[in-house]
Amino acid sequence: SPRIGVLALQGDVREHAVALAALGADVARVRRPDDLAAVQGLVIPGGESSVIDKLARAFELHDPLREAIAGGLPVYGTCAGLILLAERIVDGIAGQQTFGGLDVTVRRNAFGSQVDSFETDLEVPSLGAPPVHAAFIRAPLIEQVGARAEPLAHLSDGRVVAVRQGPLLGTSFHPEVTGELRFHRLLLDAVAAA
Ligand code: GLN
């Protein structure tokens, strides 16, 4: 079975590990460059993107991960993980960096301060039926999708909340907290194809 890492610096690591294990992956926590070198695919969890960014630099994972992504490593980022895969953030904290890879612009905490979190059923054409029950938790919005990236899902008002670019996948929401496994399956498919 493929060895899939979960970036384990901060955030909802355990939920992703459970989802990947349910799909038969050999799951490894990634904290050091050596851990990263041993995986065939990676999940970047939700959490706080500025904290994960700082820790990745402190653990000397920033450059290796950036290079692995540029080299074609399949990676799935949820929420903060999506922010960390984005080429552009419109409202990062001072000095906030990303690993890049996804040709998108994201806005952090884009769904307002009053209604920070919500759940909704989302039609995802490439996944078919049933709809995805998606949890948005202080979620980012994919504000602009560049030519190299492809939108996978929209809210009913048209805003983009899931995107794919080759072996990279990003969602504003958390499928791992609602038992949804199809996005993790897409990651495993990308690993099998790589
Ligand atoms: N708002 C968080 C951030 O900017 C993301 C929230 C989440 O991952 N659930 O990183």
Image: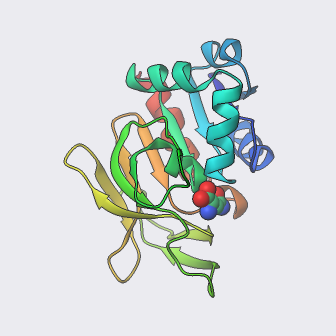
Q: Image point 71% across, 24% down: which residue?
A: 59
Q: Disc count in the image?
A: 0
- Quarter-of-image position of residue 1: top right
Q: Residue furthest bottom?
A: 114
* Quarter-of-image position of residue 128: bottom left
- Residue 100 position, x and y percent, is 42, 37
Q: Is residue 107 above or below residue 92?
A: below
What residue occupies the far right of the structure in this picture? 14
| x then y, percent, for residue 103 | 31, 45
Q: Is residue 175 visible?
A: no
Residue 137 spot, x, y in % from top left: 65, 69
- Could you tell me which quadrant the C terminus lies in? top left
Judge whether 173 appears above or below 114 on screen.
above
Q: Residue 127, located in which quarter of the rendered image?
A: bottom left
Taking the spot 63% from the left edge, 88% from the top edge, the residue there is 114
Frontmost residue, 42 versus 34: 34
Say which residue appears at 61% left-offset and 82% top-offset: 113
Viewer-nearest residue: 103 or 183 = 103
Task: Point out the quarter of the image occupied by ligand 1.
Answer: bottom right
Q: Quick one: which residue is furthest to the left in this view?
A: 147
Identify the coloring: rainbow
Which residue is located at x 56 percent, y 63 percent? 173
Does 62 appear above or below 43? above
